[in-house]
Amino acid sequence: RKEVEQDPGPFNVPEGATVAFNCTYSNSASQSFFWYRQDCRKEPKLLMSVYSSGNEDGRFTAQLNRASQYISLLIRDSKLSDSATYLCVVNKGSTLGRLYFGRGTQLTVWP
Amino acid sequence: EPEVTQTPSHQVTQMGQEVILRCVPISNHLYFYWYRQILGQKVEFLVSFYNNEISEKSEIFDDQFSVERPDGSNFTLKIRSTKLEDSAMYFCASSAELTGAGSEAFFGQGTRLTVV
């Protein structure tokens, strides 16, 4: 079973749309959760950490449901510059900093 | 803004040759990592390094791989005898604390390794 699974996408949305990505993780011992963004052939960059109470950063809202082992990312008022692959990333507390990546969900925002 | 730098950006090598990928982590970071991403696939952990020794390695990191921090700034990944399936983008990352402790891992821009 994969450690982290994501919606395969791709998502193609117009500017201004709201889009949501989902992710599930298999290990209930997982402790830290992140959304990274990866542009084509570039390095992953941290978009935001995900906290148990849910958190928001501008147009981005992340939610965590530990009981369901489910993470989500909501993007409101999509911009052209949001076009990228969004990676769900998990760290298990028992491992020394190792990050487990989902395969990513590709988003294209069109004008 | 401090950043992780990797060289070269692209390396082409013949099967069976040794390659060394180089990384300069952010200067005050203590934890160092190598990840790889085969084209079209997910980012996969290879190894973590702390206090001049390997902290953890994945099943991918077999005897053909080694890491070294030869001086106070560089962090290298060596592949002794490259195989076609080693072709991938290799990312170096560093963090001030363990990433599980909420510390962000910063990634370098990657080295694209092509084995022919």
Image: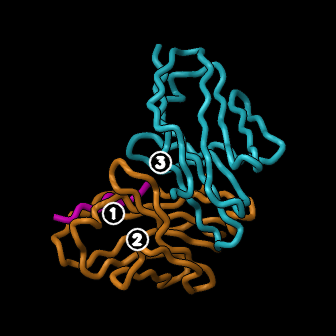
Comparing A57 with A14, the one in front is A14
Can you say whether A9 is above or below A67 in the image?
A: above
Q: Residues within 10 Å of mark 2 (few under 14, many from 20)?
A: many
What residue sits 36% from the left and 85% below the top? Answer: B63
Give the chain coloured cyan: A
How far apart in space, not on screen, are marks 3 and 2 (Cα)? 26 Å
Given the image, on which type of amino acid does mark 2 rest?
Arg
- Which residue is label 3 attached to? A103
Amino acid identity at mark 1: Pro
Instruction: Identify the amino acid type marked 3.
Output: Arg
Q: Subunit of mark 2?
A: B
* Residue at image mark 1: B8
Color of chain B here? orange
Dominant SS in magenta? strand
Q: SS for tag 3?
A: loop
- In percent of width and height, residue B48 lies at 55, 74
* Magenta segment boundaries in residue numbering: B109-116
Q: Which residue is mark 2?
A: B22
Q: CB of mark 3 within 8 Å of CB of mark 1?
A: no
* Membership of A89 in magenta stretch: no
Write down the chain letter for disc 3.
Answer: A
Q: Are marks 2 and 1 in contact (CB under 8 Å)?
A: yes
Q: How many marks?
A: 3
